[in-house]
Image (tube, coloured by chain):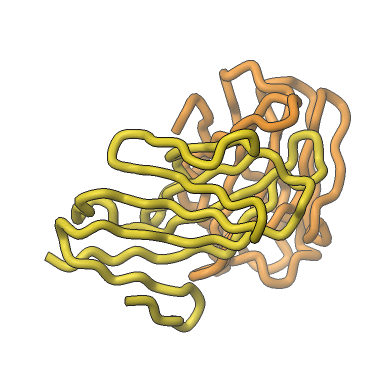
Chain colours: A yellow, B orange
Amino acid sequence: GESVGLHLPTLSVQEGDNSIINCAYSNSASDYFIWYKQESGKGPQFIIDIRSNMDKRQGQRVTVLLNKTVKHLSLQIAATQPGDSAVYFCAENGDSSYKLIFGSGTRLLVRP
Amino acid sequence: DGGITQSPKYLFRKEGQNVTLSCEQNLNHDAMYWYRQDPGQGLRLIYYSQIVNDFQKGDIAEGYSVSREKKESFPLTVTSAQKNPTAFYLCASSSRERGETQYFGPGTRLLVL
């Protein structure tokens, strides 16, 4: 389940289960959304993106869902593996031409 | 790391010293960014540049300076005016088109001696 840690909310899941990480975005003008994965001591890595003309997009073991009505974005990871343990950030483009607005992040812990 | 390099990986700063963090990209991107990340926190924008010889302050620019003399390079100087410089610094780049991904470098961890 989810819990709020000292800084980042944490999601703990059993290896092999599916994970769902949620993000509430802030700007109604946003039409581009990205999920990043950041492992400890490394830079954020692009996972998947979605544009506002879609409500679902699938990649390899990952799916992003977009609900523009409630300004909600989610990342689903199928068959979660230990290598999925990381901090996950969502980002939106707001009304800027190229700058991104980043969410505060969710830590995913995978239990063996 | 998508063609973006940052150096050094670790940097130590003495009190009152200015230090410069390097960021180079070979993605032919016009826009480059510097972010600061504190432990357990998200990303905060320090400076960004959309084209050579032009840059703008982000949300936490005080105590930092940048230059953009070449498209490929966007160095960040942490000046002595930055009183709490210990953090993880991330450089990113993107095209200037709306709705394009930012790609990040591996980061530089700055520590104060």
Report the residue at 47% width, 83% height from top. Answer: A6
Left or right of B111? Residue B72 is right
Residue B43 shows in this picture: no
Quarter of the image that includes the C terminus of chain A: bottom left
Count every numbered label the image shows and give the total: 0
Q: As rendered, which of B21 and B37 lies closer to the eye?
A: B37
- B81 lies above or below B96: below
- Of all residues, the one furthest to the front in this rendering is A69
Task: Place residue B59 in its image quadrant.
Answer: bottom right
Residue A5 shows in this picture: yes
Left or right of B109? Residue B52 is right
Location of residue A56 in the rendering, given as x and y in whole percent from the top left corner: 48, 40
Location of residue B15 in the rendering, given as x and y in whole percent from the top left corner: 67, 68
Report the residue at 51% width, 63% height from top. Answer: A105
Task: Place residue B50 in its image quadrant.
Answer: top right
Q: As rendered, which of A24 and B102 lies closer to the eye?
A: A24
Location of residue B111 in the rendering, given as x and y in whole percent from the top left corner: 54, 64
Q: As rendered, which of B107 and A11 lies closer to the eye?
A: A11
Location of residue B60 in the rendering, given as x and y in whole percent from the top left corner: 78, 60
Report the residue at 47% width, 52% height from top. Answer: B10
Task: Place residue A96 in its image quadrant.
Answer: top right
- A29 lies above or below A7: above
Quarter of the image that includes the N terminus of chain A: bottom left
